[in-house]
Amino acid sequence: MFTSNRADVTVTQELCRRAAEANQRRDPHDWRVEETICAARTNIAITAGAFADAARLAEQAATIARTGGDLADASLWLGLAAGNHLLINDAPRAVPLAREALVLARQIGDPALIATALLVVGAAVVETDPNRPAPTYARVSSSARRSAIKAPSTWSGPSGSHSSWTTGPPPSSSAAVPSAPSNGAVTAS
């Protein structure tokens, strides 16, 4: 998992291969190893921007966790799968996954998982609203990519007035906007 969090694809793939081989030699197989392999591969898919693959792998990890009796992990993975479906503009698929994540979170009574699942349900449901303009996540994603190139690197607005979802000063600000670093990175202040 640690190498996948650092986006070290080659090492992660090798470690997943070794873990799968070792687990094959176990009798019985350890479902936690299979879940961890799915988790690592999900991280790599997210890092690579392969959100459809990440959604599929997160759903697979949820199934493994549920089969193993770990409803907390199943809830977490279902929420992550739903979020990845939103990133590929598949809100109709995200809604049932998010709702299932919420059911499991409530079943085990974990406040953090309940709050997370409620957030994912809200994001998924709002994306299916027929009165809402074209897919929000696609607009935000492409807009964020364009903004990342032009975004200021050091601006910080008045406390609480600047959303973490944006990359520049609010429209009403007359503050001078510094130029972005030459590599296009946006740094938080």
Image (cartoon, helix red, strand yellow):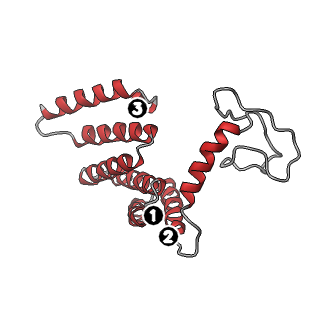
Residue under the image location 58 percent in, 75 percent down = 131
Neighbor class of circle 3 (other Cα within 10 Å; few <14, some 14-19, many 20+) is many
Query: Along the line of sight, which residue is nearer the eye, 178 or 146?
Result: 146
Residue type at tag 1: Ala
Tell me: residue 75, above or below residue 177. Answer: below
Amino acid residing under circle 3:
Ser
Q: CA distance from mark 1 to mark 3?
A: 26 Å
Chain-order first, disc 1 or disc 2: 1
Instruction: Kindly state the secondary structure of the residue where label 3 is placed.
Output: helix
Quadrant assignment, res 49? top left
Which residue position is annotated with label 2? 128
Rendering quarter of residue 97: bottom left
Can you tell which mark lies on residue 33?
Answer: none
Q: At numbered mark 1, what does the secondary structure look like: helix, strand or loop?
A: helix
- The percent position of residue 187, horizontal first and vertical second, equals 68, 33
Closer mark to the observer between disc 1 and disc 3: 1
Identify the residue under disc 3.
4
Give the quadrant of residue 82. bottom left
Left or right for 156, reference 19:
right
Left-right relation of 116 to 104: right
Q: Nearer the viewer, residue 168 or 161?
A: 168
Give the CA distance from mark 2 to mark 3. Answer: 32 Å
Q: Quadrant of the C terminus?
A: top right
Q: Which residue is mark 1?
A: 91
Name the spot of residue 69 as percent of width and height, x first. 27, 53
Q: Residue at x 53, y 73 (%)?
A: 129
Q: Label 2: how many residues lie within 10 Å, few (<14), some (14-19) or many (20+)?
A: some
Mark 2 vs mark 3: give the one in front.
2
Dot placed on the residue nearer the N-terminal end, 1 or 3: 3
For image coordinates 23% across by 26% down, the residue present is 18
Residues tagged 2 and 3 counted as in contact (Cβ below 8 A): no
